[in-house]
């Protein structure tokens, strides 16, 4: 009797121990599986994917590794497709620039001729359209370069004030022609990790828009504010303002203000500006009421956070 | 829009108030694309909160359908809805709803632990760094400013890797400058972690930070806006 009870107890003990071990195995397996799934989602190398033993986790990891491999290959393919697209765009733009340049040359030659008045009017129009075409192509090339990642944003510690100065100098002439005063309040030097060249482009786009949409004798203010987390570059104008329902749309590609189709542009300036800010870990925003001007801001992180 | 992650179809919510029927939502067709940041703007009583609650599975519609990440919410049991909310939805409310006795890190990982999932430490660290909370990791919520607390709430919403984040007036308790920073970080984080965000607000300054602004008035969408394809 005693012997039987003892045997039963031992057996029970063993089975409890076994169950405990099984439970632990399941937990370890789940833990490892989740870890690997997270790695898969993040595109990081998997743990124990070369497991050769005939275990459950070995089998699963083998499959996961295969999935990751397929994912990587697809990514590679999409990169290659992008690369081809990039070449195509660069080819097209190159091919088109030459005829445009030729066209401009011909127009210049025609200008020197004595022409009847009516022909002169058409010549003006032709010239205007050619300039537009030229601008359009340059913009498209710029945009496609940013989109396809041909242009890498390179952040470096440098003086933001210098970047802003260069942006201003590019619009001074256009502003002067419309009798618009540009006032810059920036206490230099302002050391900030940013891509100087592309940030200049982004600020220039804002200033350029401000000049376009501000009437004669208006004012444009450029200022830099240091927040807790972001440095804000503000471009404020006294133009016609933007109603709220359009304030998100203006940053979309090819967006044009409905009532101003006569103003130069194809509607990629703000889109580019937004991309440039985002690629640097920042964002853009606008505050405006209709008829009361607009305050655009490019906000870039003060600290490099990668 | 065919890559939508949230969609409502002819969504209606009627309340009986005495003899009157209040139409909080009166046939709303709303959709949000994956990775999109949509702001729903409207006055108080326009139905924007009701819409958000329907999408988050917090309230049941009178009629109509809600789909989130390929799932139909109608017909889910109470428990299924609870699991749905835990796994698919991150909430950010006006009040931060942080647990006062837990530090920043513990607050952020709490929903993941409650769900019995493994904590992806590297991911949490990345979020902390992006939201400029690294130095506050061990701090208790009571010692943080309002803006910092809301940043923790945002980190908590992102950390559980939900399909969508629903934000209900997230800057309602913050001053202008702080709202600014919080919204900026929300936006940067949304892009960085490719997160879909639906935000409701009455404040146009806040709404303009979104990729798209949807106007809601008297329980109907009056303007759905174009999206910024980013």
Image: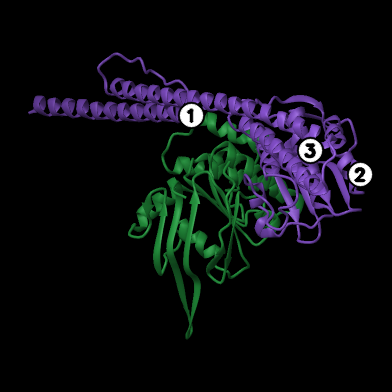
Chain colours: A purple, B green
Q: Secondary structure at mark 2?
A: helix
Residue B144 seen: no
Against B77, is A277 above or below?
above
Quadrant of res B59: bottom left
Q: Residues within 10 Å of mark 1 (few under 14, many from 20)?
A: few
Q: Chain of mark 3?
A: A
Q: Residues within 10 Å of mark 2 (few under 14, many from 20)?
A: some
Which numbered disc, 2 or 1, marks the residue closer to the eye? 2
Q: Earlier in the sequence, mark 3 or mark 1?
A: 1
Q: Which mark is residue A237?
A: none
Q: Nearer the viewer, residue A175 or B95?
A: A175
Q: Chain of mark 1?
A: A
Q: Are marks 3 and 1 on the same chain?
A: yes
Q: Residue under label 3, please give it.
A: A204
Position of residue B5 measured from the top left corner of the image (x, y, whole percent): 45, 48
Q: Residue at x 71, y 42 (%)?
A: A129
Q: Chain of mark 2?
A: A
Determine the residue located farthest toward the bottom in the rendered image. Answer: B19
Q: Residue under label 2, please give it.
A: A176
Q: Nearer the viewer, residue A20 or B116?
A: B116
Against A235, is B12 above or below?
below
Q: Nearer the viewer, residue A274 or A181?
A: A181
- Label 3 and label 1: CA atoms lie apart by 36 Å
- Mark 2 touching mark 1, by CB under 8 A? no
Q: Residue under label 1, please give it.
A: A42
Q: Residue at x 65, y 25 (%)?
A: A152
- Mark 3 touching mark 1, by CB under 8 A? no
């Amino acid at each position: 009797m005693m012997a039987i009870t003892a045997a039963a107890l031992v057996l029970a003990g063993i089975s409890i121990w076994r169950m405990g071990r099984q439970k632990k195995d399941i937990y370890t397996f789940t833990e490892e599986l989740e870890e690997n799934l997270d790695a898969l989602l993040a595109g990081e190398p998997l743990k124990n994917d070369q497991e050769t033993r005939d275990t459950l986790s070995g089998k699963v990891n083998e499959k996961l590794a295969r999935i990751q491999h397929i994912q990587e290959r697809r990514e590679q393919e999409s990169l290659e497709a992008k690369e081809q697209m990039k070449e195509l765009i660069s080819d097209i733009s190159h091919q088109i620039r030459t005829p445009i340049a030729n066209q401009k040359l011909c127009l210049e030659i025609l200008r020197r001729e004595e022409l009847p008045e009516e022909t002169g009017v058409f010549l003006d129009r032709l010239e205007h359209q050619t300039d537009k075409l030229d601008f359009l192509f340059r913009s498209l090339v710029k945009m496609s370069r940013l989109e396809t990642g041909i242009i890498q944003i390179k952040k470096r510690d440098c003086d933001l004030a210098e970047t802003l100065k260069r942006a201003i100098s590019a619009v001074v002439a256009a502003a002067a022609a419309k009798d618009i005063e540009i006032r810059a309040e920036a206490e230099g030097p302002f050391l900030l990790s940013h891509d100087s060249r592309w940030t200049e482009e982004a600020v220039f786009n804002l200033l350029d828009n401000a000049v376009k949409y501000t009437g004669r004798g208006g004012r444009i203010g450029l200022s830099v504010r240091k927040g807790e987390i972001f440095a804000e570059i503000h471009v404020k104008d006294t133009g016609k303002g933007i109603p709220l329902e359009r304030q998100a749309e203006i940053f979309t590609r090819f967006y044009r203000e409905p009532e101003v189709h006569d103003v130069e542009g194809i509607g990629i300036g703000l889109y580019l500006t937004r991309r440039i800010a985002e690629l640097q870990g920042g964002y853009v925003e606008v505050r405006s009421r209709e008829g009361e001007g607009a305050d655009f801001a490019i906000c870039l992180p003060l600290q490099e956070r990668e | 829009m065919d890559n939508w992650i949230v969609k409502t179809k002819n969504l209606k919510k009627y309340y009986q108030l005495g003899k009157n029927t209040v139409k909080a939502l009166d046939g709303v067709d709303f959709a949000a694309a994956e990775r999109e940041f949509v702001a729903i703007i409207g006055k108080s009583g326009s139905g924007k909160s009701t819409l958000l609650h329907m999408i988050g599975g917090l309230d049941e519609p009178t009629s109509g359908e809600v789909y989130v990440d390929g799932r139909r919410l109608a017909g889910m049991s109470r428990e299924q809805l609870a699991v749905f909310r835990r796994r698919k939805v991150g909430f950010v409310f006006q009040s931060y709803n942080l647990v006062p006795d837990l530090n920043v890190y513990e607050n952020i990982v709490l929903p993941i632990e409650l769900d019995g999932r493994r904590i992806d430490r590297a991911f949490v660290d990345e979020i902390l760094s992006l939201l400029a909370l690294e130095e506050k990791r061990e701090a208790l919520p009571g010692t943080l400013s309002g803006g910092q607390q809301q940043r923790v709430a945002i980190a908590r919403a992102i950390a559980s890797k939900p399909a969508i984040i629903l934000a209900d007036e997230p800057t309602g308790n913050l001053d202008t400058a702080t709202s600014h920073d919080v919204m900026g970080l929300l936006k940067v984080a949304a892009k960085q972690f490719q997160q879909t965000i639906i935000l409701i607000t009455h404040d146009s300054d806040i709404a303009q930070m979104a990729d798209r602004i949807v106007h809601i008035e008297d329980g109907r969408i009056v303007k759905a806006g174009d999206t910024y394809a980013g």
